[in-house]
Amino acid sequence: MPVLFGTSEWAHALEEGINASSEYRNAGQSWGTGFNGNILFAFEPGGAIARGSYLLLRLQEGRCLGAEFVPGPTHPDQGFALRAPFPLWLDILNGKTLAASAILTGKMRVEGNTITLLKYAGAHRSLVHCVATLDTRFPEA
């Protein structure tokens, strides 16, 4: 049964999906070693969402130590933030756009060391795959 995007149940299901992914575990095995690997996904207003939605993933060494929607566009525990309008996120999750391409073209804004983020592109592709394969009910426009 699809889980509604933006809920604590969805965040928990994503955490479980990331931790069950051997692909992410292998690709991200050194992510967060010696630096803060927590990522804030900022789903900014657009399309079906009128208000932003902010997901903090606590990531280290190929594991997700926690996933939660947080109330605002920044969080003291974030090491990186990826910001894009909700319709672009949907294109990324549906495989129509690559996150790396969105970053390089400036459609997705990065806070944190972009070089470090791109160095681990394989880990982030695996992470996006975990999100994309989650049985999700997204808000409709």
Image (cartoon, helix red, strand yellow):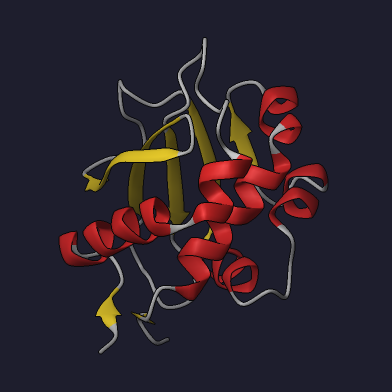
Residue 76 visible: yes
Residue drawn at the location 39% of the way across and 58% of the way down: 20
Image position of 96 (left or right of 15): right
Image position of 53 (left or right of 108): left
- Residue 76 occupies quadrant: top left
**Quadrant that contains the N terminus:** bottom left
Q: Nearer the viewer, residue 2 or 91?
A: 2
How far from the left and from the top, in percent, is residue 122?
Answer: 70, 46
- Residue 40 occupies quadrant: top left
Residue drawn at the location 74% of the way across and 67% of the way down: 97
How far from the left and from the top, in percent, is residue 55?
Answer: 34, 48
Tell me if residue 98 comes above or below residue 25 in the rendering.
Answer: below
Tell me if residue 74 comes above or below residue 132 in the rendering.
Answer: above
How far from the left and from the top, in percent, is residue 58?
Answer: 35, 34
Tell me if residue 4 comes above or below residue 105 in the rendering.
Answer: below
Q: Nearer the viewer, residue 108 or 56?
A: 56
Q: Farthest residue to the top: give it.
A: 34
**Quadrant that contains the C terminus:** bottom left
How far from the left and from the top, in percent, is residue 23?
Answer: 58, 54
Q: Farthest residue to the left: give it.
A: 8
